[in-house]
Image (cartoon, rainbow, N blue to C red):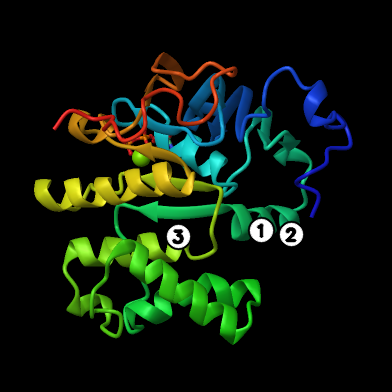
Amino acid sequence: MSVADDEDRPVPPREARSAPTPIIEFRDITKVYGSGDAEVRALDGVSLRIEEGEFVAIMGPSGSGKSSAMNLIGCLDEPTSGDYLFKGVRVNDMSRAERTLLRRNFLGFVFQGFNLLARTTARENIELPLIYRGSSQAERDRLVARAISVVGLGGRAHHTPAELSGGQQQRVAIARAIVTEPALLVADEPTGNLDTRTSQEIMDLITRLNREQGITVVMVTHEPDIAAFARRVIRFVDGRVESDTGQRSPEQPPGAALPQGVSGHAR
Ligand SMILES: Nc1ncnc2c1ncn2[C@@H]1O[C@H](COP(=O)(O)OP(=O)(O)OP(=O)(O)O)[C@@H](O)[C@H]1O
Ligand SMILES: [Mg+2]
């Protein structure tokens, strides 16, 4: 797949570039569902750039277009108009098969409802994306063991979701999302079904993935306490970006916003 090159806009050599290529770029995106009287303009001219290594929270009232934007970012849906560029490549121009490859190789998804297979152990759930990707048994064993140790599942890897707490289920879902070593973690209300304390633990984990593994995180949340873990907050209202605070300027290298070891959220 040609994620690294773009036929329309050849990527210049690194030294010739004035600013790094954002991992996500929306150019005047609209998303319209339905038609006629039933038409809903879920996104109404959204332009934004997210650089590699950022940790972004998306906030806004119910129906403001957050999930619509996440579905586009995750290549689960296509815009009605406008361009989406992933690492500088127009996703609009990709075939369905290329978008599937992009999802499998670059993206990890975490949802409010965990979305785990019920009669399948934690370990098998985590292994699934690697089976889809055609990884060898040896590679699967290595990557699954690593993902389990990163999320801290303890001895629960051979239990089914029904035998796990909500927090443990979300750890399994996060392990499944990161087992392929994605560049981008897309999380839609990852703590929506969890109590306050478990939410904090899950957010500590997501923060570590961002800081220590350099995974770019884009996360929808309704809760200011959860958004406070992010370094940047984009607020949607009526399908438009109402505010965008804490945005990193393109000149700043990843991680430059805070001195090393300094926590980015008020506790
Ligand atoms: N598949 C769909 N078909 C028709 N309308 C849709 C569809 N998905 C979303 N919408 C509409 O688009 C608008 C934006 O929805 P979206 O799910 O993006 O909102 P949201 O910000 O994620 O809200 P919430 O906080 O409730 O999850 C809403 O008016 C919604 O009803
Ligand atoms: Mg939503």
Provide residue 197's location: percent of width, then percent of height.
Answer: 10, 49
Q: Nearer the viewer, mark 2 or mark 3?
A: 3
For label 1, the SS is helix
Disc number placed over residue 177 in the picture, else none? 3
Q: Nearer the viewer, mark 3 or mark 1?
A: 3
Provide residue 175's location: percent of width, then percent of height.
Answer: 39, 64
Disc number placed over residue 85 in the picture, else none? none
- Determine if residue 195 is in view: no
Going by the numbered disc 3, the residue's amino acid type is Ala
Query: Callout 2: 10 Å neighbours few (<14), some, many (20+)?
Result: few
Q: Is mark 3 within 8 Å of ligand 2?
A: no
Going by the numbered disc 2, the residue's amino acid type is Ala
Provide residue 84's location: percent of width, then percent of height.
Answer: 66, 32
Task: Please state, as top left, top right, bottom left or bottom right, where the C terminus lies in the image.
Answer: top left
Query: Callout 1: 10 Å neighbours few (<14), some, many (20+)?
Result: few
Give the Cα distance between marks 3 and 1: 15 Å
Q: Residue at x 28, y 61 (%)?
A: 170
Task: Please state, as top left, top right, bottom left or bottom right, where the N terminus lies in the image.
Answer: bottom right
Query: Callout 3: 10 Å neighbours few (<14), some, many (20+)?
Result: many
Residue 60 vs residue 106, the one in the foreground: 106
Disc number placed over residue 100 in the picture, else none? 1
Residue linked to disc 2:
97
Q: Is mark 3 in CB contact (under 8 Å) with mark 1?
A: no
Q: In the image, ligand 1 is in what quadrant?
A: top left
Q: Is residue 33 left or right of residue 2?
A: left
Q: Quadrant of residue 87?
A: top right
Give the Cα distance between marks 1 and 2: 5 Å
Residue 90 vs residue 143, the one in the foreground: 143
